[in-house]
Image: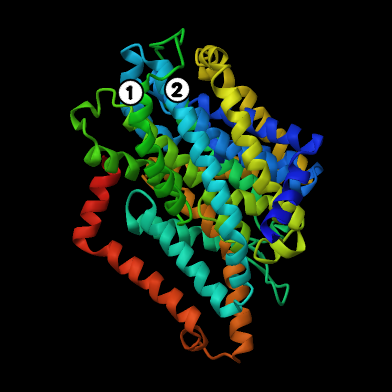
Amino acid sequence: MDLLDNLALGFSVALSLQNIFYCFVGALLGTLIGVLPGLGPVATIAMLLPLTFGLPPVSALIMLAGIYYGAQYGGSTTAILINLPGESSSVVTAIDGHQMARKGRAGAALATAALGSFFAGSVATLLLALFAPPLANLALQFGPPEYFSLMVLGLIASVTLASGSVVKAIAMIVLGLILGLSGQDIYTGTPRFTFDLPELSDGFDFVALAMGMFGISEIIRNLEDEHQRSLVAAKVKSLMLTKEEFKRIIAPVLRGTALGSFLGILPGGGAMLSSFASYSIEKKLSRHPQEFGRGAIEGVAGPESANNAGAQTSFIPMLTLGIPSNPVMALMIGALIIQGITPGPNVVTEKPDLFWGVIASMWVGNFMLVLLNLPLIGMWVKLLTVPYHVMFPAIIAFCCIGVYSVNNNVFDVYTMALFGLLGYALVKLDCEPAPLLLGFVIGPMLEEYLRRAMLISRGDPTVFVTRPISAVLLLLALAALVVVLLPAVQKGREEAFKE
């Protein structure tokens, strides 16, 4: 009964005219940036953070969530029609989806992606409603040592699941932690890492760092290598699936949903990881393995279901523990902090309208996305013809206006530009910026719980290993790091990411 009462509260919040509007705006923007290659949800949410200051917290989070899972839908459109994924998790969809389009089955591929995404998103949202509250209740039993150990585990897990060199991923985490410590000491108020600049007395601005690292750097990278786009299906024909095709997608959708729901909870980008894992599983289980890479419909159904399920369940650790599982969730935590809300298990009890309103809005948003993606496919196709060099000046102007409006401070614009150049340099050095953002967000919280634990234990560091839950979490973190550093595992990991 409690679950039904909570869902009733959630739908009463989500179905208000104001929140329906922001859910629609989020879903529309998410689809748009998923369709347009070169933006992505991280860059877009970073750019739109300033707009959320004037919104109620519930509406702000509903809109940002809509952008995130909307991008998972939209990214499949470009992957299928022009073999250019609009979002990283749609890379796998391009393999067979584009081949289907070349054979005149673009409509069937798009319908498969939309239906699989809708089913997976709905199921994953149900899992979020079922399992998030018990997890939050468990988290209420955590003390500072347990929270410290949990954050260490989250950071280590993000390293093991990040693509590229493990050493570089650890370096990005450490750089993010150092940047997060800039400003005043949380207990003494002493300035540190401020370089005698009064503007850094409160540390680096989160919005400026995020917009620079993921917005400006992405613009520079896309200008360097603007893809030539060639549509294979300017006019998409029937969106109907044949009876045989419908039978073939049922099992992959179910498997993709289950896999994505589990992997989405893990730190490090579960949506992208789950789509790759789903494709590998479908290729091994399929009765038609020879079709993979040549237009197998299972190669669209499984990965699309997996990445959407992963996108939804990645909200579980963010809403219940205050731990971001990927860069988008780190931005969500930043949005909550900007709104004066402390992320963590208390959100469920102290802000039930926010918690259940966001969950209920996901069902509403998933329904909207089916309506946005299939009937309006012609409009999305036309948008693909817009050259990137026409769009980027407007994007840069929007970034500058947005970051300046946060504090009315020109220094933040310079900070954004600096981090934009840094982000571009990191990409050229094959360093993934995502762990840096996670380190930046988690760093201050990690320090706070470390110092609280040491104060409670009167300086005794064994408090982290004498408390059972804390000890288990640290052992898991150590095991994850040791396993990924084993030569055989490291080689297999590099081959998997390369593929």
Q: Residue at x 51, y 55 (%)?
A: 325
Q: Position of residue 126 (x, y in %)?
A: 57, 49
Looking at this rendering, what residue extends furthest in the top direction?
235
Q: Is residue 102 left or right of residue 4?
A: left
Q: Residues within 10 Å of mark 1 (few under 14, many from 20)?
A: few
Which mark is nearer the camera, 1 or 2? 1
Front-lying residue, 196 or 182: 182
Front in this rendered view, residue 389 or 196: 389
**Disc number for residue 43:** none
Q: Which residue is mark 2?
A: 110
Q: Quadrant of the N terminus?
A: bottom right
Q: Quadrant of residue 142?
A: bottom right
Residue 49, position as x, y percentages in the image: 69, 42
Label number found at residue 244: 1
Residue 294 at x, y = what percent?
Answer: 25, 23
Q: For the residue marked with disc 2, what is the amino acid?
A: Leu
